[in-house]
Image: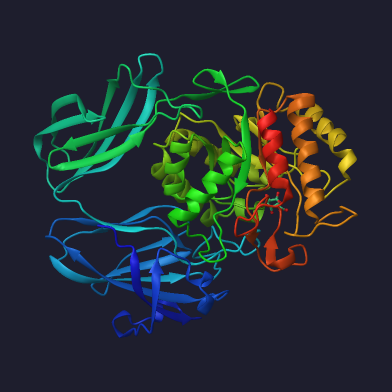
Amino acid sequence: MNLDGIWDFAFLGDVDPESVQINALIYPERMAVPTCFDAAPAFAGQRGLVAYRTTIHLQDTTPHRLVFESVHHWCRVFVDGKPIRDHAGGFTRFNVDLIGLPAGQTELVVLVDNRFDAARSPLHLPHYDWYQYGGISRSVTLRRLGDLWIDNLRIATDDLTLPAIMVNIRYAATVGLGLTPLIITCNDQVVFEEQVNLNDTVGEIIRRLVLPGAGLWSPDMPNLHWLRVHLGDDERCERFGIRQVRVDGRQILLNEKPLRLLGFNRHEAHPQFGHSQPDALLIADLQQLRDLGCNFVRGSHYPQNPRFLDLCDEFGICVWSEAIGWQNTAEHLTDAQFVAAQQAHITEMVEAAANHPALILWGLLNEGHSHDERCRTTYATLIEQIRHLDPTRPVTYASNQPFGDLCFDLADIISINTYPGWYTGELDEIPTELDRLMAHLDAGAAAHKPILISEIGAGAIPGWRDAHQGRWTEQYQAQLLEIIIRHLFVTRGRVCGLSIWLYNDFRSPDSIWRPRGLNDKGVVDEYRRPKAAYETVKRQFRLL
Ligand code: ADA
């Protein structure tokens, strides 16, 4: 049951969650779920503890599960007045299991806190260059689990030519059930049937399925298939694509063919909805990205909305999914609490998104201090964790220290954020600067690895054009991006991909570097109105 809608709401302010008497709360407001409450005019820019309330219905006394797709930044979930679970970190899915509760109508209350608190929500630090909105920002659902449920269903390509997939079914049950029927259908055809022995209350069933004639997924031909697994009384359906991505020397191969990634970074931000992404906005963004001639989006700097990933699967747009981070230093990367929070977040990111064929690349820790020896252990630990959770995709991280980085050997792809012509140098120096960068990488870390330019760009205040065409004008941004695209792909051709910084303008903490309170490096503004660079990039991408 989808619980999205209008919930009761209370803004409690600078209050300690431990001191809140849940049953005594009064809810003077109403709030949409999902949305970010601090994007709404009444609470714009406010930080504090808030309470959301709705009513849920438990069908019977068997286990039920609340699934939250994302809550910022910290929350405590109460059912029937009792605290069930705390969760820290936005942008990822987490479950709240309801075990042994009476059947019928009951009250669900979620205390949500968008204040910065490095101890309680270590993943959200105030220096990050994006406005960190608060609230229940993605959908909430209630599931009846019953006595046996499929906890997770993972589908991975095993063989491209047959083709064949590996299906991993993780199940849980309240009691050992013995022989239980397992039936798997693909696109409504039964492809597998067996009696499985479920003596344990948790376990994994792994099967290899050959699917003759099933079309492969690629950006040009995004074929998708439905896998439906019936285990006892439970049923789970997942959409998947058959495709393989791997790194071979300096190239990324998709289905054994070189893949050139052309696209943008994208922030999940909108002045009216904050990090929430209504379907209409997702579709509009994807339509523009397709119109721009993209086949790639880097989800900067956190895991993207599952609905966005669904649409990327359909539109044939490849995605880099990134675990949250922004210029984290040794202070964070050697802090056990921060590392543990990253590990939990990475597990949630991979679990939620692994079946999306569009997702071709995992990333982490944007511009963390990978040039500081003290940070290397954490880079190694987290990258290893991602590989362990999902050995089927390359791993990378965006470095802004290409001349001093100490962790490039840990990554499958070398990704560089660089701002020639913006933070350093002038337009005519861009080609030389890019060549200097490539020469350095080719002589060392990237000699046998692909290079991706994960950020590059310039600010442009929407509507500002003038005869001098200097920094902050739309003309300057358009010229800079044209020079970069032509140099990278027409003159040179060394890099395997580009994600321009960035698709959309987005709110950032107040600073003299951020006119209008926004990071203005989008080719569309915060309401997605195109700047001059939109047409320039579109023309250049389409010529390649
Ligand atoms: C960095 C960072 C981005 C953004 C960008 C900018 O490269 O990774 O998140 O802050 O700079 O706009 O300056």
- Residue 287 visible (yes or no): yes
Dividing the picture into quadrants, the one containing residue 352 is top left
- In the image, residue 426 sits, relative to residue 513, either above or below, namely above
The quarter of the picture where residue 178 lies is: top left
Q: Quadrant of the C terminus?
A: top right
Q: How many marks?
A: 0
Residue 101 % position (x, y): 16, 64
Task: Report the front residue among 308 and 245.
Answer: 308
- Position of residue 273 relative to residue 475, above or below, is below
Where does the image place residue 539, in percent across and percent down from the top left? Answer: 70, 36
Image quarter of the N terminus: bottom left
| Image point (68%, 46%), residue name | 534
320 in relation to 156, above or below = below
User: Which quarter of the picture shows residue 100?
Assistant: bottom left
Q: Is residue 230 left or right of residue 139?
A: left
Q: Is residue 404 left or right of residue 338?
A: right
- Identity of the residue drawn at 73% across and 25% down: 494
Left or right: residue 481 compared with residue 6: right
Against 252, is 386 above or below? Answer: below
Direction from residue 389 to residue 95 in the image, left or right? left
By what rule are the colours in the image chosen? rainbow
Residue 128 appears anywhere in the view: no
Front-most of residues 499 and 466: 466
Residue located farthest toward the top when viewing the structure as drawn:
161
x and y, in percent, of residue 369 in the image:
68, 47
Q: Position of residue 229 (x, y in %)?
A: 22, 35
